Structure formats: structure tokens, C-alpha cells
């Protein structure tokens, strides 16, 4: 038994992917620049993992008094207090820092006790405390992990394919990482160690897409010795289009429920994964492959003529 919609999908497609490449290259450059501007001007909304300080997730019997909570934290000695409502009206997240001469654990316990006295019935669902030294080390370690991952992937693609494939893959993955960070910055979504884990997952997914893309192109390069490289790229992408749609849609369907129902704690992680999957699929077709087309490839029996940039 076949699903009606799947049964009516075309088995063979003939899209001219490379025809749109110059226009989408301009779009990609614009979005990369916009992401860079957002990162340098707005920065990332660093969570407690990276910014240091104390984070408390609370629940109140009635609607959370956001203003009163913020004012009370300031009176209790908390620096830069932030109070954000999450999910239901009676749940909120408190973020604040303490003076350098105050012990983080003892100071957090004092504020917790004062809040319990001032707001009867308040419940503390979670309390995270991170010192500034630890947060700085975590921030450096997270981006070091991203850099090492990209370097190893460049080496792997270079060995398995050719240098131009490796460079194109890394440029594509960097494109995905910059746009994802830019989107997190523009939307002011919290950036924490969980987000770093999501970014590493996005990098792996994006690189996997590019390996599959290059593998199909390499097979066709061996099969069709005199076909122009531009036509081979279109042929390869049309051949793997159904696989791309099925894989991407399956991953997105699995994440869609958690994106809307997972709550504020999971939202940064799931949003990063969803956006990364979409942009990783796009960059495989319209960032990595156009770079290979411009550079040209070695077919064994002579070089394919590079296309004009």
C-alpha cells in the first residue's frame, strides 16, 4: 500500500541547481555579513555556563511577579539581575551575579532563603552556580572543540577526495556555523554548553551531507568522462534529491514536537539543531558544490575545466 502523496512524487527530476548558484551566493554572503554584524554588535546571549553567575528556575503559586522579583534581587545584593518568564505564567528564570568578594554558593543560599521569606510558596526547581574562571574555561573549550572538529574534517575530506573538496566542505560548514551563531545572536537565544553540543551535532550533520554529495559526484565523474562538470553536478544532485528530502524531513519531524512542546529548557538545543539541519542541507548544494565547480576537479585523465567565477 502506497501513501497517495508519495506515490505521486516524481521518480526522476531534472532541476538546474547550478543555474541559481550565482544568485544564492550573493544571498549567502549577505546573511554571513549580517550574522557577523549581529555577533559583533549584539553578541551572544551567554548562559550561566559561559557568563558565570547564578541561575534559578522558580515556580510561584500564582502569576510570577517579574518586576517585584527583579527589584528584590537588586535589594538583596545581586548584580545585573535578570528575570524572565518561561512557559506558564507562574514559572520564571532568575539570573544574577554576586560581588567578587562573596562566596558564590553561600551567597546563592542567602538569596534563596530571602526569596523564600519574601515570596511564600515559591519553589526552586533548579539552581546552577558557575564561577567566572570556570565559565571562561568552558567558553574557550567549547570553541576549541569546534575548531578541532573542523580541522579533522578538512583532513578527512582531503584524504578521501581531493583538496578542493575538503576546502569546499570546510567553507560550507563554516558558513553553517556562522549563520547559526548569527541567528542565535539576532533572536537573543541563550548560548550555553548545550548549544555547543548542538553546534557540534550540526557540524557533523552538515559534513555528512557534504560527504554524501561529493561521493555521488565522484561516482559520476568516473562514469562520465567528458560531460561538463556543471551538468554532472546537476545530475548528481537530482539523483540524490529523494534521499536528501527523506533524511532531512525525517530529522525535522523528530525534532518538531520537541521544538514546540519541549519547553524553554530544551528550546535553544532543538532550535539550533533544526536551523542547522536546514542550513546544512542548503550549503551542501549552494555553497560547497559551487566552490568545486569554480575550482575544477581532477578526473584522472585530465582536469575538468573550471567554470568562470
Image (spheres, rainbow, N blue to C red):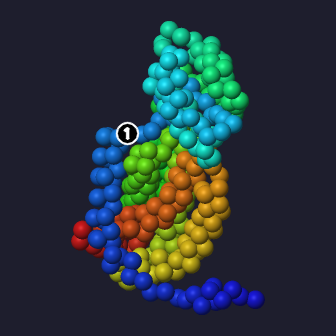
Is residue 5 shown to the viewer in this render? yes
Which type of secondary structure does the marked residue at label 1 adopt? loop
Give the vertical position of 286 relative to 44 (above or below): below
Residue toward you, 231 or 107: 107
The residue sitting at the left extreme is: 308
Q: Quadrant of the N terminus?
A: bottom right
What is the crowding at mark 1: few (fewer than 14 residues within 10 Å), some, or many (at least 20)?
Answer: some
At 60% from the left and 56% from the top, the residue drawn is 259
The residue sitting at the right extreme is: 1
| Residue to which mark 1 is pinned | 43
At 38% from the left and 64% from the top, the residue drawn is 287
Q: Quadrant of the C terminus?
A: bottom left
> In the rendered image, which quarter is residue 197 located in?
top right
Give the vertical position of 86 relative to 284 (above or below): above
Q: Position of residue 224 (x, y in %)?
A: 44, 82
At 43% from the left and 55% from the top, the residue drawn is 176
Residue toward you, 237 or 306: 237
In this rendering, position of residue 14 left or right of residue 72: left
At 32% from the left and 40% from the top, the residue drawn is 40
Residue toward you, 276 or 257: 257
Amino acid at each position: 500500500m502506497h501513501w497517495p502523496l508519495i506515490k505521486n512524487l516524481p521518480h526522476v527530476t531534472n532541476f538546474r541547481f547550478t543555474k541559481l548558484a550565482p544568485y544564492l551566493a550573493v544571498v549567502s554572503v549577505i546573511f554571513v555579513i549580517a550574522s557577523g554584524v549581529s555577533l559583533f554588535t549584539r553578541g551572544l546571549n551567554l548562559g550561566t555556563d559561559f557568563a558565570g553567575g547564578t541561575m534559578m528556575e522558580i515556580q510561584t503559586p500564582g502569576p510570577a511577579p517579574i518586576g517585584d522579583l527583579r527589584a528584590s534581587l537588586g535589594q538583596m545584593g545581586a548584580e545585573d539581575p535578570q528575570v524572565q518568564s518561561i512557559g506558564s505564567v507562574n514559572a520564571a528564570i532568575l539570573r544574577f551575579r554576586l560581588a567578587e568578594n562573596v562566596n558564590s554558593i553561600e551567597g546563592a543560599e542567602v538569596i534563596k532563603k530571602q526569596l523564600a521569606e519574601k515570596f511564600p510558596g515559591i519553589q526552586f526547581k533548579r539552581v546552577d552556580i558557575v564561577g567566572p574562571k570556570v565559565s571562561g574555561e568552558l567558553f574557550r573549550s567549547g570553541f576549541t572543540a569546534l575548531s578541532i572538529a573542523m580541522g579533522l574534517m578538512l583532513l578527512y575530506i582531503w584524504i578521501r577526495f581531493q583538496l578542493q573538496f575538503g576546502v569546499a566542505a570546510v567553507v560550507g560548514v563554516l558558513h553553517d556555523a556562522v549563520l547559526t551563531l548569527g541567528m542565535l545572536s539576532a533572536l537573543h537565544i541563550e548560548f550555553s554548553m548545550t548549544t555547543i553540543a548542538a553546534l557540534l551535532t550540526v557540524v557533523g550533520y552538515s559534513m555528512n551531507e557534504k560527504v554524501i554529495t561529493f561521493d555521488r559526484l565522484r561516482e559520476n565523474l568516473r562514469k562520465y568522462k567528458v560531460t561538463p562538470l556543471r551538468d554532472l553536478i546537476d545530475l548528481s544532485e537530482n539523483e540524490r534529491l529523494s534521499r536528501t528530502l527523506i533524511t532531512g524531513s525525517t530529522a525535522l519531524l523528530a525534532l518538531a514536537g520537541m521544538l514546540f512542546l519541549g519547553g524553554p529548557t530544551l528550546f535553544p538545543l532543538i532550535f539550533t539543531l533544526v536551523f542547522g539541519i536546514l542550513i546544512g542541507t542548503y550549503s551542501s548544494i549552494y555553497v560547497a558544490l559551487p566552490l568545486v565547480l569554480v575550482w575544477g576537479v581532477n578526473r584522472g585523465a585530465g582536469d575538468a575545466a573550471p567554470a568562470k567565477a
